[in-house]
Amino acid sequence: MPRFFLEKMNTETPVITGTDARHIGFSLRTKPGEILTVCAGGTDYKCSINRITEDAVFLDILESRLCAAEPSIDLTLYQAVPKLDKLETIIQKSVELGASKIVPVLTRRCISRPKDFAKKLERLNKIALEAAKQSGRGIIPEVMPIIDFKTAVSQMSETDCPVMLYEEGGGRFSQLETDGKKSFSLLIGSEGGFDPEEAEYAKNAGINTVWLGERILRCETAPLTAISILMFITKNL
C-alpha cells in the first residue's frame, strides 16, 4: 500500500498537495477509490482517494491507529562524520531500525571534514524519507546540520540514557539502566574512533561508555549494531 507523510493531518478535509499529489496522480496513475496510507505525527491513516486534481489528492479517512512500527523510545544517533557514502548507509539503516533523529558530529579524528555539508542535507534527508517509507515508519527522522563534539555531549546529557561507544573499554549494554527511560542517545565514532580526551570529557559529563568487545567494527557497522541492541533490550525489536 502506498505510504505518504504529512506534518499534520486535517481530519475534516484530508488532502495531499505538492509533489506527492503529482506523484500519486501522474506517476502512480492512482484512481479514485484506491487505498493509501498517510502518516502524520506517528499515526497511520488508512485513506480512500475521493478525487484527484492537477495538484491535489482529496481523501476520505477510513480508519486511523498509532503506527505499529514506531519504537516506544526516542533514539537520537550522534554520528561522527565518516566518508559521505558511509554516512548515507548509516542514515538509511538507522532509520529502518528505529532512530528518531541523526546528528552528524565533527570530532578530532574525523577524516571527512565536508565544507559544503549544508548542500548535502537535502539529499541525506531524502534518503531518510525513502527509508521511512520503505520500513513503514510513522515519522520521518530528520538529519540535522553538523555540530561539534562538545555540543553533541551537551545535547546528549539532556536525554534519559546517553551512550558513547568507546573502543578502549567501558561497560556492556546489558549493564545499562533502561527501565522506564524514554529518550536515548548514541554517540558513535568515525573511521578514526575517539580521542582519549574526548572520551574523558564525555565520561565527566555523565555519558555512559559502552564497549562492544574485542572485535573492531567499522564505523558504518557500529551504529547499526548499537541501535539493534538498544531496540532489543527495550523490547522494540
Image (cartoon, rainbow, N blue to C red):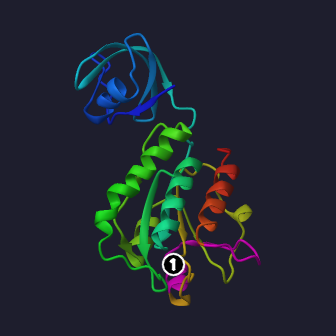
Residue drawn at (68%, 45%) of the image: 237
Residue 177 in the image: above or below residue 126: below
Residue drawn at (46%, 31%) of the image: 3
Which image quarter: residue 4?
top left
Q: Nearer the viewer, residue 94 or 42?
A: 94
Amino acid carrying label 1: it is: Ala
Which image quarter: residue 37?
top left
Which image quarter: residue 41?
top left
Q: Indicate the secondary structure of the residue bearing disc 1.
A: helix
67 relative position to 124: left or right: right
Instruction: Estimate how packed mark 1 is, as few (under 14), some (14 to 19) or many (20 or more) residues with alpha carbons within 10 Å.
Output: many
Task: Tell me if residue 54 can be seen.
Answer: yes
Q: Nearer the viewer, residue 187 or 58?
A: 58
Q: Read off the magenta span.
A: 198-218
Q: Nearer the viewer, residue 227 or 181?
A: 227
- Image location (x, y in percent) of residue 232: 69, 50
- Image location (x, y in percent) of residue 160: 52, 58
Residue 206 in the image: above or below residue 52: below
- Residue 142 falls inside the magenta stretch: no
Residue drawn at (46%, 44%) of the image: 130
Task: Tell me if residue 157 can be seen.
Answer: no
**Residue beneath disc 1:** 202
Residue drawn at (64%, 73%) of the image: 218
Residue 47 in the image: above or below residue 16: above
210 relative position to 52: left or right: right
164 relative position to 19: left or right: right
- Image location (x, y in percent) of residue 208: 59, 71
159 relative position to 177: left or right: left
